Image: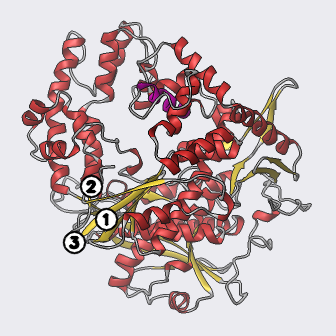
Amino acid sequence: MHDLHQPLPAGEGETGIPDFLRRGHPLCNTVTDVGVIPHVLHRDFETRGRISLKKVGTDKYATDLSTEILCIGFAVNDGPVQLWLPGNPLPEVWFEAARNPNWVVAAHGDHFECAIERHILAPRHRFPLIPIERHRCTQAMALAVGLPARLSAVANALELANRKDAAGERLMHQMSKPRRARKDEDSNGVYWFDDEERLQRLYTYCRQDVEVERELYDQLPPLPPAEQALWQLNCTINERGFCVDQGFAEAARRIARAAAPEIDAELARITGGAVTGINQIARLQAWLGEQHCPVESLDKKAIEKLLNTKLPPHVQQVLALRLGGAQAAVKKIDALLARAGKDDRVRGAFRYHGASTGRWAGEGFQPQNLKRPVVENITAAIAAVGTGDYAHVCSLYPKPLSVVGDCSRSMIIAASGHTLMGGDLNAIESRTLAWVAGEDWKLDSYRRYDATGDPRDEPYCITACKIYRVTDGTYTKDSPERNVGKICDLAFGYMGGVNAWRKFEPDRFTDEEVKKFNAEWRAAHPAIKRFWYDIDRAALRAVRERGHVIRCGPIAFKSIGSFLLLKLPSGRKLSYPQPRAVGDEQRQHVVFADNAAGQFKDCRNGAGAYGGIWTENIVSGIARDLLAEAMLRIEAAGYPIVLHVHDEIVCEVPEGFGSTEEFTRLMTRKPAWALDLPIAAKAWIGKRYCK
């Protein structure tokens, strides 16, 4: 295994940013094929429009006729920041950047600038377009090293000399959308904050953004070539979009909206009229307090946590109504329809490196959070929901909202003359966990199952046999014990206990039974259990022994500058900013600045990392790398990807193109760094996304 980086040179900057993260360092230079360091055109656009960018997404916002450019701030390399306004001569540097392969263009959140260039600057103002291969995104670069996505947050985290203008940002938001009509103005008119004083302040703000983005570009390492290729593929997938059945989605929304009064009536009945609407938060909190269940929040996570505790049945019913209320279903469909364009396609749904492990995240409409259907006959459910008739659906199904949720994936369809072809990697996290930890019996069971397809060899069944201490092969996929084996793998693989189990199975089995399952699972997986503690010690040692490579099986750590780096078997590195060892001599652990949920604060609110977190990050990162390599192969083979979710890839192909056999081969081809990892996948084909 190669060293993570060269030994740390002396003379780090006061910010603690290591020299290898600085643009001038040999590891950071972006060099073209002919060995020339390219010119960089930094750019930032300010726009305004009548529709909400946050609500409809970048592509739909950019294609709307009301959206227009207010100004462009730009600079070449370290040159002065310049401003272009509509009506001015086009900047010559744009033509040079488009013509010269030794130029690249950069922006923070380049997808926005790219969409504005494609849909506004090129057709309306005759700007040339620069090929996507020469685009660079500082937001993607920041996310790839574990830093925040927001420009203001990453500038603060790196203590840049240039910072985001907070007052200017507020002004920008004010000027980017129509203002209310004044008393002496026609209420049907469209009006803006566009007086000269505000415009001048906006121009200053735009110039400052370029300064911040340029300094950030100079401080961050470029994406490695493989990751740059993935970022470009992400741009291609986002621009391509996926097709939605808007008529079917509208019908589902009508059913969800019709269910709201019924839910409110049930809520009023249970609470004796104290609460008459699912969104009456203050009343709900007061009523719950009277039931000896005080709550500070009633968001999804808070309710799910409460439902995993012992509560009176009527309190559970109220919380369940709040959690599964019609509003959630309506909002999901609203988000889908709001982002669908005139050609029925939703674009820009995926964020590169949305998680610190490298996995993608959803934008707006969240494809990753779509419910897996549990209804037995999904075709019949689609037909019922497609009527848009709430009474009809109620006559067929006792829980109509659940059926609407079951049909949410089916709102994604193939365009006319095309079909969807997809596949998912089978139990990839369970396989990867066994592989990285060296749990050989489990790897052998996967290999045997992949070879035979015998339901008695299915690894979740084998796990269940070990937990119940019966002979391997006793249970099959139809045995109820098999589900125990599966949930044990999902809940306990990262040091989870009863609470982790309850996320998958909230009601069945007592806590004592779950604790016994946990003990039996750990006893059956000694290598995984040992790996948890070994990997935690390795991370701690790497933080203590800065600059040294600390290995743990196929994983390596190195603490350098203000980052702890974790090298995966693929060679890709996960980055943990601001690592430090905390605790006493008896028990120490690593704390790092975590970018989860868009916040940049100590992981687990200062409680720090432990073996389960490192293991989950490693497994998630490896699974992501396997999927990413499969995506590149599948796209190169002519299967246009429109959707991908964790371990699944969905393509939209012309009718009659390709085959599920070829698709499966492309998905399961092993990379050179994982030749002994058993990989399996199952492909499907259809007009709707129903997997």
Q: Is residue 485 magenta?
A: yes
Say what amino acid the circle numbered 1 marks.
Lys
- The 10 Å Cα crowd at callout 2, few under 14, some 14 to 19, many 20 or more, is some
The answer to whether the residue labelled 2 contacts the one labelled 1, judged by CB atoms less than 8 Å apart, is yes
Q: Residues within 10 Å of mark 1 (few under 14, many from 20)?
A: many
Dot 3, how many residues are within 10 Å of its Cα: few (below 14), some (14-19), or many (20+)? few
Which residue is pictured at 62% across the width and 44% down the height? 444
Q: Which mark is residue 417?
A: 3
The quarter holding residue 340 reads: bottom left
Question: Quadrant of the rendered structure where residue 175 is?
Answer: bottom left
Residue found at the far right of this picture: 10
In the rendering, at what x and y percent does residue 144 appear?
A: 63, 58
Of helix, strand and loop, which one carries label 3? loop
Is 499 positioned to the left or the right of 274 in the image? Answer: right
Residue at numbered disc 1: 60
The residue lying toward the viewer, choosing from 152 and 579, is 579
In front: 164, or 281? 281
* Part of the protein shown in magenta: 480-491
- Please determine whether, in this image, residue 120 is positioned above or below residue 508: below
Cα distance between the residues tagged 2 and 3:
25 Å
The picture places residue 634, in percent across and down from the top left corner, at 46, 68
Percent x, y for residue 46? 44, 68
Q: Is residue 172 inside the magenta stretch?
A: no
Q: Mark 2 — residue?
A: 338
Give the residue displayed 60% in from the left and 34% down from the top.
493
Q: Mark 3 and mark 2 in contact (Cβ < 8 Å)? A: no
